[in-house]
Image (cartoon, rainbow, N blue to C red):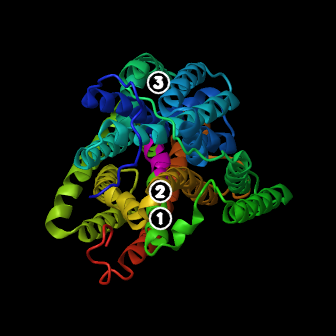
Amino acid sequence: MTITAPKTTPPTGRRAIDPRLALALLALPTMLIAIDISVLTVALPQMAADLHPTPTELLWMNDIYGFMVGGTMITMGAIGDRIGRRRLIVICSAVFAVASAIAAFSVEPWMVIATRAVMGVAGSAIIPASMALIGLIFPDPKKSVAAMGAFMTCFLTAMAAAPVIGGLMMAQWWWGSVFLLGVPVMLVTLVAAPRMLPEFKSPKATRIDFTSAALCLASILLLVAALKLAVGDGWSWRTGAAAIAGLALGWVFVRRQRASADPLVDLSLLRVPGVARAMWVLFLTALLMGGISLFSGFLLQNAGGFSPLQAALWLLPATVAMMVGSNLGPWLGGKVGPGKVVAGGLVLMAAGFASYALVSTGGAGLVALVCGGVLTTGGIGAAFPFLMNGIISRAPEERAGSAASFAQTANEIGIATGLVVLGSIGTVVYRSHMGIAGSDESWVDGFRSAGNDAALLHQVQDAFTAGFRAVALFGLAVMGIVLALQLVRGRANAESPTG
């Protein structure tokens, strides 16, 4: 795997810094940001029981963080170039810590949504600033590649381990503890970063186009709001208005980027052979992995009757598979070729969704759930580094940094979009099986209402499981598209980073 290190001019007067300690410090807040993307997998059922959110609020509570990370990352990267990347990390670590503390003691759904939105913006600044500093800390290209690989492995592993961490904390405390985890981590970063990290300001930083940033974020959020309104209230004039407004702002954003001398996003990268295809593969796999996480916690806790810790332990094999895949994939790439590793990883993911489609409320369904988790996380763990590098390596050298930010943004938005799309499919199927199509009742309401009524609980469990299987079948169909995208022109590009 080859990653082009950013060309930077080392700042003058920089003190001697242990590169390994600096890398560890950069990885620490990044792992926390990754954890916060999926930690609500096990916390959401108890949060829903305490805060009584509507179906729309429930989805916003879970996915607003990922949307804000993905929607503001490119803008925050540009701000870091202007004011200094280390300074941005310090500022946003403080913001993240304060927002996390407030989120932990939220008493209304809107408080969770608002604080997670702030946390998402802060997290979107820390990730690109950290990646940019790695090239400065490790000027040797080989060491820079190894450091970037370790950084990406930490991010993926933390995301996969989030349910276990959340389950362990909730076994001892309450759901707010999963947010308090961010306070000490960010305080350590706040204190140590000025002493252990170098500072860098780009000598040729371009003007920050805040108008484009606002257009991009507004377009994304309006389109997501349209999906949520369709799920919660059905199709109405509000749903149509949100969708049309989102598409219109997206069109204006694209036009502005094409006309600008200093675009926020260099859309010409998509015309480079292979980049658009690799971007779609990355986006769609992230969409499926982000969406399926919404169901696993509910299936284990509400349909299976497990405690948060027990549910987290049942998800542990998937975490291990992610760690193994992310380390085994690059090694296999040197033996059989990156293209074959990516194709094999995607086939494993497809097999995982086929296993999910066999999920039921019995013991066999639990086995199917665990097998699906192992296959999907192991597959994406092996393929992800090559998918990212496939976009970076195909871009011209002078655009490698822009390509990396673009790819990471596609991944973050894919995760958050999956929560909406797959959550919507599951909700519609659930309501259909319960005979309440057109209502605003969710499976959260169903499990709460069932209480000790064994007959009603069984009905709700069956309806929820049917929704899960529908989501799995949708995922299997999408994986067919992903494999087709990956394998197209495969023979002609057999030696390329993604085949």
Q: CA distance from mark 2 to mark 1?
A: 6 Å
Q: Residue at x 66, y 44 (%)?
A: 55
Q: Position of residue 209 (x, y in %)?
A: 69, 48
Which of 313/341 is in front?
341
Does the stretch in magenta take in 291? yes
Q: Which residue lies under the disc numbered 2? A: 407
Q: Is 286 placed above or below 83 here?
A: below
Which one is earlier in the sequence, the residue at label 2 or at label 1?
A: 1
| Up-down relation of residue 178 to residue 213 (above or below) | above
Q: In which quadrant of the rendered image does the C terminus lie?
A: bottom left
Q: Of helix, strand and loop, which one carries label 2? A: helix
Q: Position of residue 436 (x, y in %)?
A: 69, 55
Q: Secondary structure at mark 1?
A: helix
Q: Secondary structure at mark 3?
A: helix
Per the rendered image, the range of residues in magenta is 290-298
Q: In this figure, which residue is indicated by the disc labeled 3? A: 182
**Residue at position x 33%, y 80% from top?**
490
Give the residue at mark 1: 279
- In terms of sequence position, does the residue under pointer 3 or pointer 1 come before the other? 3
- Answer whether labels 2 and 1 touch (C-beta < 8 Å): yes
Magenta: main secondary structure:
helix
Dividing the image into 4 quarters, which one contains the N terminus? bottom left
